[in-house]
Image (cartoon, rainbow, N blue to C red):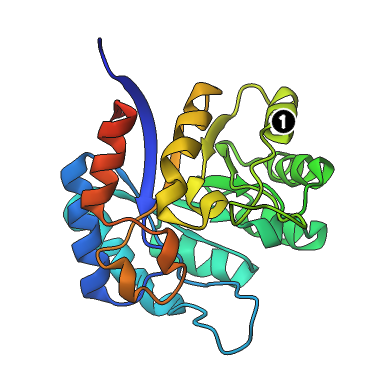
Amino acid sequence: MEKKRIGLVAGPCSAENRSQMLETAWGLKALGVQMFRAGLWKPRSRWGSFEGVGAKGLPWMTEIQRELGLKVMTEVALPRHVEAVLKSGIDMVWIGARTTANPFMMSELAEALKGSRVTVWIKNPICPDIALWIGAVERLQNAGIQDVRVIHRGFCVVDSAPYRNAPLWELAELFRHYFPDLTYYCDPSHIAGKRGLLFPLCEKALSLGFDGLFVESHNCPEVALSDSAQQLTPTDLGALLRSLQVMIN
């Protein structure tokens, strides 16, 4: 039986240093990954947590883009992030769950992105409020963004056990009725919170017709500066893909 072909975005939660980025990117390229993600600016809950290297990491992203031929993306949460990313020539950006929940910030980001040709991925809001998710997409589309894609990363609820965030698949399915023509990816890393829980979540997402997966992968997750428990090495990501019996588009 021919394997199902899916889209895949993969890369570390955070860009930490050049060697970590390049080693991870080479490992992912060997799997056939064509879209590489890494957070440069990290919205963290607690003061003093690692909040990313910021614009310092943009040359590492563009080196991966240039030398490995991968499309690269990072998260933007402020207009100045957008300005720096557009100036560097990054292919794509994503807007995170905490930002999606803030209509004021979504309006500012939509205005900053207006007129650009970058692909914009939008995660669901951290709270299970479908109107905020719909409004975030509407603001981007109203700003003339041509390529908007959607990421389901789960929701923060009182009891999400055994996961870090509750999948609430029914909300993702309901949301999709409002925008049936958009591309939909699932972020099982943020739903799971632990790499050992990824397989059934990926399997479920693909059974529901998601177009692809948005997975965190790090060359050495044990020493990652953020979200170490949910990241996979490129080798382990390859094993996950084989277990799912899928190929990368």
Left or right of 83, for residue 136: right
Q: Position of residue 168 (x, y in %)?
A: 69, 39
Report whether residue 8 is seen.
Answer: yes
Label 1: how many Cα within 10 Å (few below 14, some 14–19, many 20+): few
Frontmost residue, 18 versus 195: 195
- Asked whether 232 or 215 is in front, the reply is 232
- Whether residue 223 is situated above or below residue 137 in the rendered picture: below
Q: Position of residue 179 (x, y in %)?
A: 69, 27
Circle 1 sits on which residue?
A: 170
At x 57%, y 89%, the residue is: 48
Using residue 157 as the reference point, say whether residue 144 is left or right of it.
left
Residue depicted at 81% across the width and 61% down the height: 104
For the question of whether residue 118 can be seen, the reply is no
Q: Is residue 55 above or below residue 87?
A: below
Corner quadrant of residue 60 = bottom left
**Place of residue 93 in the rendered image (x, y in percent of width and height, measured from the top left):** 50, 54
Badge 1 marks a residue whose secondary structure is helix
